[in-house]
Structures are given as structure tokens and as C-alpha cells.
């Protein structure tokens, strides 16, 4: 199959920085990201209800819900490996259409094993679309424009965390768990329609084709200490994010906070500041440099951790805001850095980064879930802090 070199239309990727179409381009990129990963974390808003429905422990349900990250890690590696030979538009389109199938089947999953398998299938489809879109942006954006494009995409990801959770909580509360998944299947199909009308297919860009084999390119990326550090940072970021926003749900519904289903959905308005701040990540990284940007982001996230241990809702919500702002900002900066540090085979580099990123989410769910069940919320937060600290150490290697 052929590569694509057509920019997203009508907002052209290589447009002048002051073009009025730039905002439209960012909107299209962000909306594509939103509809690609809206399923990923939306289910976390109904974790307590799913735990009761299947009669399992918080750790078991948390692992099942976040099993999508395993599918995403696998798909990111496979898509990255074969990225030079995949038609960007067709791959994104097929992935989003197929995503609607496991999403709708989740409505009638008879047990936790089937639920987990369907979440893995969702992850395979989501990551395929996600990785191909990131590779597309890396190929089509100029060096000066790449930061803004990646920030717009990550901002759409942030928005999906907020709006997806609100939609999930509202539908599950009013119509039941099954209708929740039917609505998200419809959103998946809406994403396919958006891609169909906004990304055009043209002749392949032979200059983008790798000179060597995908395996050799992957090995070269891992030998690059800057990229290797970026992969590790991605792992730590989702490890910390998953640990925070999966298991805090159980803290919020238990005494002394004791929130209801709809209240739990509205809690995720804490992501609203992240939607605004993440858009600035590209500019801040270009101004300050990647290392100071990521260190500052991780520090902000770290400041939120002790607040989430407080018995008062206001302090817990403030801590969640800080962790959300910090981790998403760091993720945007690290994603943009990978696109710049990989001088060739960017699709493979993006796929490898995403595999590490989503792998961190799966490991974070397993490790921190065990800690949560065995030792409680304080131990889980300590594990999150350790992951942020590891990311800060790895950031030393992100030289220009």
C-alpha cells in the first residue's frame, strides 16, 4: 500500500503560522484524536458500577478496563514496524470502523474474561488509528509547526478523558451500562466519517520510505539514548496517570467523600484546565526546551499527590487537576520530542514510543492495583510518585 502526503483538509498542515485556517486545522486534528481514544478512559467513570455488576475486586475490574492498553501497546509496535507500507488514510479509517464492533459487544459481555478480551480488541483498533495519525502528522508538519500539531492532537486526547467520562457517567446513570457502550460505538463511526472527509489520498512520498528494514530501524531507535529515554518517560507518564485516575474512583465513592454516579462523572471536569494548558506545550517546549518543560510538568503533577490523600473533596480535586495538567503537558512535550529526535523512520519511532507509553499503563494498572488492594490508597499514590521521579531522572538524557 502507499503512503499519504496530502495534508488534512481544508486546514493545510504546512500553512503559514498566521493563516486563519490554522485554528480549523487544529480543531480537525483535535477532534480526530478525541474520537479515536474516547473509549480508552471513559469506562473509568463507571468503574464502581462495573465492579458491582461483575462482582469482582477493584484491582480485577481496573485491570480489565485498562486491558485496552495491552492491545494498544501491541498494535503500536506492529503498526510502527510496518508503518512505511501502510496507507495512512485507509489504515486510520479501517481502524475506527472496526473499533465500533468490540465497543458495541461490550454491552452484552457475559463475564469479566470476555469483557477483558473486548477491551484488548478496542486497544488494538484505537492504537492503530492513533499511531498512524501521529506518523502522518510527523511526516506532514514542518519542524516549526510540528509542536503545535502534536499539542492539538494530545489536547484532543485530553478532551476525550473529560468528555468521555462525563458521557459515560451520564448514560450509565440514566439508561444503564449497555447503552453506554452503544453510544461510544456510534462515536467511533463518527470518527471514521471525519477521517473520510478530512484526509485525502495522494501519491506516495518516496522520500519517506526507509532505506533499511523496519527491524534495523527499530534497533537504531533503541540505540539512540535520547529516544530510549523518551520511550521510558512515556512508560512512566501513563503508569502514573493510570494509577491516579483508575483507583481514585474507588476513593471518591467511599466514605468520607461518598460521591454518587453522576457526581463521579462531574468530578472529571478536573481535566478542563488540561485542555487549555496542553495546547501551549509545543510553544513552551520550543521556548524553554524539552527538558525544562518536562521537569516543570512532572513537578506540577508531583505537587498534586499529597493533596489527593486529604479527606476533603476540594483538596482531592485540586490534586487531580495538578496531576492531569502535569502528566498531559509532559506527554505532549515528549511526543513532540520523539518526532524531532527521530530523523528518519518516524512512524516506527512513534509506534515504539506509543507501545512503551501504553505498556506503562498496563503495568501501572497491575502493580498499583495490587498495592491498592493490599495496602490502600496511600501506597498507590506513593507508587505514582516513584513513577514521576523515574521520568524526571530519564529527562536528563533528552539533549537537543
Image (cartoon, rainbow, N blue to C red):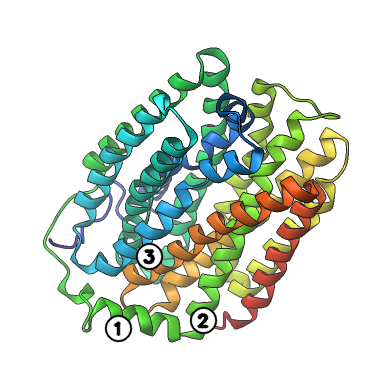
Specify few, some or many for label 1: CA neighbours under 10 Å numbering under 14, 14-19, or 20 or more.
few
How far is the residue under mark 1 from the one under mark 3? 15 Å
Of marks 1 and 3, which one's residue comes earlier in the chain? 1
Quadrant in the picture for residue 193? top left
Q: What residue is shown at x 84% (from left), y 46% (from top)?
A: 309
Q: Which residue is mark 1?
A: 216
Residue 112, percent from left and from top? 49, 35
Residue 386, percent from left and from top? 73, 65
Looking at the image, residue 294 lies above or below residue 196: below
Specify few, some or many for label 3: CA neighbours under 10 Å numbering under 14, 14-19, or 20 or more.
many
How far is the residue under mark 2 from the one under mark 3? 16 Å
Q: Quadrant of the N terminus?
A: bottom left
Q: What residue is shown at x 41% (from left), y 25% (from top)?
A: 107
Find numbered disc 1 in the image and state the secondary structure of the residue it sits on. Answer: helix
Q: Which residue is mark 3?
A: 351
Looking at the image, residue 381 lies above or below residue 272: below
Find numbered disc 3 in the image and state the secondary structure of the residue it sits on. Answer: helix
Q: Depth check: 374 or 189 in front?
A: 374
The answer to the question of whether label 2 and label 3 lie on touching residues, with beta carbons closer than 8 A, is no
Of marks 2 and 3, which one's residue comes earlier in the chain? 2
Q: Is residue 16 visible?
A: no
Foreground: disc 2 or disc 3: 3
Q: What residue is shown at x 55% (from left), y 71% (from top)?
A: 232
- Horizontal side of residue 240 vs 210, given as left or right: right
Amino acid at each position: 500500500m502507499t503512503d499519504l502526503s496530502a495534508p488534512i483538509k481544508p486546514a493545510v498542515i504546512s500553512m503559514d503560522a498566521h493563516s486563519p485556517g490554522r485554528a480549523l486545522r487544529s480543531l480537525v486534528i483535535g477532534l480526530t484524536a478525541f474520537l479515536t481514544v474516547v473509549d480508552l478512559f471513559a469506562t473509568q467513570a463507571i468503574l464502581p458500577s462495573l465492579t458491582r455488576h461483575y462482582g469482582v475486586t477493584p484491582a480485577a475490574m481496573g485491570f480489565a478496563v485498562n486491558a485496552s492498553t495491552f492491545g494498544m501497546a501491541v498494535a503500536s509496535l506492529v503498526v510502527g514496524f510496518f508503518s512505511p507500507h501502510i496507507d495512512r488514510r485507509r489504515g486510520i479509517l479501517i481502524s475506527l470502523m472496526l473499533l465500533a464492533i468490540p465497543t458495541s459487544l461490550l454491552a452484552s459481555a457475559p463475564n469479566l474474561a470476555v469483557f477483558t478480551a473486548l477491551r484488548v480488541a478496542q486497544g488494538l483498533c484505537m492504537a492503530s488509528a492513533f499511531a498512524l495519525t501521529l506518523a502522518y502528522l510527523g511526516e506532514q508538519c514542518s519542524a516549526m509547526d510540528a509542536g503545535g500539531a502534536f499539542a492539538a492532537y494530545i489536547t484532543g486526547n485530553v478532551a476525550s478523558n473529560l468528555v468521555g467520562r462525563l458521557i459515560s457517567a451520564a448514560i450509565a446513570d440514566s439508561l444503564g451500562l449497555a447503552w453506554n457502550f452503544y453510544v461510544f460505538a456510534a462515536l467511533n463511526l463518527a470518527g471514521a466519517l471525519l477521517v473520510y472527509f478530512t484526509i485525502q489520498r495522494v501519491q506516495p512520498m518516496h522520500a519517506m520510505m526507509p532505506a533499511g528494514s523496519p527491524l534495523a530501524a527499530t534497533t537504531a531507535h533503541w540505540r539512540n539514548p535520547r529516544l530510549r529515554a523518551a520511550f521510558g518517560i512515556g512508560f512512566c507518564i501513563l503508569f502514573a496517570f493510570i494509577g491516579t485516575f483508575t483507583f481514585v474512583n474507588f476513593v471518591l465513592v467511599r466514605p468520607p467523600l461518598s460521591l454518587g454516579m453522576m457526581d463521579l462523572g462531574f468530578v472529571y471536569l478536573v481535566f478542563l484546565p488540561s485542555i487549555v494548558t496542553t495546547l501551549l506545550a509545543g510553544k513552551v517546549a520550543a521556548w524553554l526546551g524539552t527538558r525544562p518543560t518536562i521537569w516543570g510538568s512532572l513537578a506540577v503533577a508531583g505537587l498534586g499527590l499529597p493533596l489527593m490523600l486529604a479527606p476533603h473533596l476540594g483538596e482531592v480535586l485540586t490534586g487531580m487537576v495538578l496531576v492531569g495538567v502535569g502528566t498531559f503537558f509532559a506527554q505532549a512535550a515528549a511526543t513532540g520530542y520523539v518526532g524531532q529526535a527521530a530523523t528518519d523512520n518516524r512512524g516506527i519511532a512513534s509506534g515504539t514510543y506509543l507501545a512503551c507509553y501504553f505498556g506503562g499503563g498496563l503495568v501501572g494498572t497491575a502493580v498499583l492495583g495490587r498495592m491498592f488492594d493490599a495496602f490502600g490508597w496511600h501506597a498507590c499514590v506513593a507508587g505514582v510518585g516513584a513513577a514521576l521521579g523515574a521520568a524526571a531522572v530519564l529527562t536528563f538524557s533528552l539533549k537537543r
